[in-house]
Image (tube, rainbow, N blue to C red):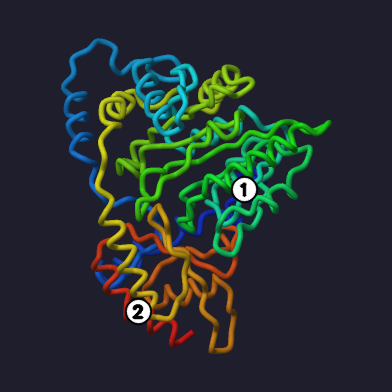
Amino acid sequence: MPIAKGIAEAMTSPQASAIRKMFEEGIALKKKYGEDAVCDFSLGNPDLEPPPEVDRAIRAQASLVQKGKHGYMPNPGYRDTRVAMAEKASLEQGVAVPPDNIVMTCGAAAALSCVFKAILEPQGEVIVPAPCFPDYYHYAANHGGRLIPVPARADFSLDVDAVQKALSPKTCAVLINSPNNPSGKIYTTGELAALAGALTEHGNRPGNRVPYLVADEPYRDIVYDGREVPALFGLYGETLTATSFAKNLSIPGERIGYIAVNPAASQGAQVAAACAFAARILGFVNAPAFFQRVVAAAWKCRPDFSSYRTRRDALMSALDGAGITYAVPEGAFYLFCKVPPRTQPGDSSDGAFCEHLRANLVLCAPGSSFFCPGWFRMAYCVPEKTIDTARDALKRAVERW
């Protein structure tokens, strides 16, 4: 029995998630060689335990005796939860975000899917600075859109001129992710203000629609060296944020997040309503009731991310020892590394180097999956012992490359 042609093509594309493929291969390799022998940096799976406030909220909700607590609620989510998320979004964005501009979702992936379902016209274009998360390609394609990756600058900062040149009458949105997966780059207020100006100028031209600026922000809280992720709502009216609690509260499997629509958006009420409607017709219906109540109670907690910085620095030291260059992450928990020059005959691509690393029991994701050939990604949300084991393996791999 055949499957749909589009799905068959997507499953075999470079964006079909080499990340998951490597993660699954890692499980098999660990069974063969032993858990401690394999250095798996493939998947961005936060390994910190949820903060105590989350555990307390879970216990409180589990013991709550309340009729109908597992029933349906309005598609945008519980009112109390939306009030709490509106407070959170208001603090982050520096403007008063009303609860009606919040839509609870099944994580950030569902949030982006709902946004694209709500705003994309057929063949509508979504411009995204590259490197970027591979599944953005599918999120746009699922709703008839086209992802247009635009290379960032050499240091992975935002290339506003390149984005501006890519804008067209078909542009529906520009999608940004800061801190960026995979580079860890945080876009500055100056860069974002310049981007807002470019989008405003484009939208004012006859025949163009005003593009939305969509910010994917699951890593907003995981930053280093006193940095902050700039607010967007005060820079550009037609802005939406999509986020989750997967990374900051370490609950990726619980699938809970939300969309926040800028109150300055020209059709903000319609956009929020469209996103809620999209959740229904895409089959999510509503975000999980239990964890809506949990995050409403626990969102103010401030987890300690210092161990991510410790492991970032340890992995950078290991890469230095192996002679591998990289972009120093300003946030998130990934290192984006340059494929070293090849000294042996053969394929010198990022895919080939990741296969070479795998042969040395080091698992990473090729940069081509992130629309950035010649690089590879290492997720350092792993035990420190894994990083220590990788030191010699990385050296051997480069020497034999």
Query: Could you tell me which residue is drawn at 26 percent across and 26 percent down?
Result: 297
Q: Residues within 10 Å of mark 2 (few under 14, many from 20)?
A: many
Task: List x then y, in percent, for residue 58.
Answer: 21, 30
* Upstream in sequence: badge 2 or badge 1: 1
**Disc count in the image?**
2
Q: Give the residue type that dot 2 points to.
A: Ala
Q: What residue did someone put label 1 on?
A: 128
**Is 37 in front, or is 276?**
276
Percent from the top left, x then y, of residue 295? 31, 29
Q: Nearer the viewer, residue 24 or 349?
A: 349
Kind of residue at badge 1: Val
Q: Which quadrant: the N terminus?
A: top right
- State the residue lying farthest toward the front: 190
Q: Judging from the image, what secondary structure is the residue with disc 1 in?
A: strand
Q: Is residue 386 above or below residue 259?
A: below
- Mark linked to residue 355: none
Outermost residue toward the right in this view:
206
Residue 86 x/y as whole percent? 41, 23
Secondary element at image label 2: helix
Q: Which residue is mark 2?
A: 393
* Vertical arrangement, residue 366 with respect to residue 199, above or below: below
Determine the residue positioned at 54% across, 70% down: 351
